[in-house]
Image (cartoon, rainbow, N blue to C red):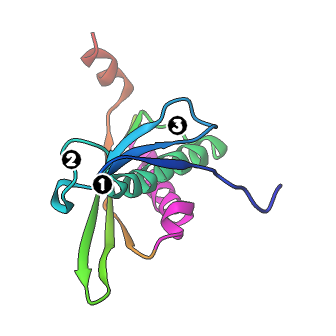
Amino acid sequence: MDTMHKYEVRAKATRVRSGVVASDAIAEPIVFSAPPEFSGEPRVWTPEHFLVASVVACFVSTFSGMSDISKFNFLSLEVEAEGTLERDATGWKFTEIKLRPLLKLSQEKDSERGSRLLEKAEKACLIARSITAKVTLEPEIKVTPEAVLAAATI
């Protein structure tokens, strides 16, 4: 396995505090702006959202990959993420990112294993390991027997 990978991205300013980010490896560019609290446009992706999205996307893909490798079946995984930006003597920085995964399982007996995999994914997520902000995991596991789930979707 390679010991190094590079990911190339470019950004172009389109207006004050706004621009577009793109990569030759990805089909769609993303329009971004500074957040409104820093004189940017509202309802547009921000670098702050990109950072939080990177952590939560890494967590989801890490958990999914670990589950696949270990043959752990789950019904669904949805994760809410919240990044806290704070100002100190050196300026603004992210101090914490909370991950709130909701893992749905079909069998109660899988709950403990699911909990361990969620914790393992949080520790293994390379984006979370690459930042200085504290990453906090607040998991919730729900057991929804498949028969009940199937009846609910009819």
Q: CA distance from mark 2 to mark 3?
A: 42 Å
124 within the magenta span: yes
| Amino acid residing under circle 3 | Asn
Mark drawn on residue 70 = none
Say few, some or many: other residues with alpha carbon within 10 Å of mark 2 (under 14 / 14 to 19 / 20 or more). some
Q: Position of residue 55 (x, y in %)?
A: 44, 57
Residue at 79 percent across and 62 percent down: it is: 3
Q: CA distance from mark 2 to mark 1?
A: 8 Å
For marks 2 and 3, the one nearer the N-term is 2
- CB atoms at circles 2 and 1 under 8 Å apart? yes
* Residue corresponding to mark 1: 17
| Amino acid residing under circle 2 | Glu
Q: Element under label 2? A: loop
For marks 2 and 1, the one nearer the N-term is 1
Q: Position of residue 52 (x, y in %)?
A: 37, 56
From the viewer's perspective, is the residue at label 2 or at label 3 nearer?
A: 2
Q: Element under label 3? A: loop
What residue span does the magenta drawing correspond to? 108-131
For marks 3 and 1, the one nearer the N-term is 1
The one of 133 and 25 positioned closer to us in this rendering: 25
Res. 100 visible in picture: no
From the viewer's perspective, is the residue at label 2 or at label 1 nearer?
A: 1
* Residue corresponding to mark 2: 41
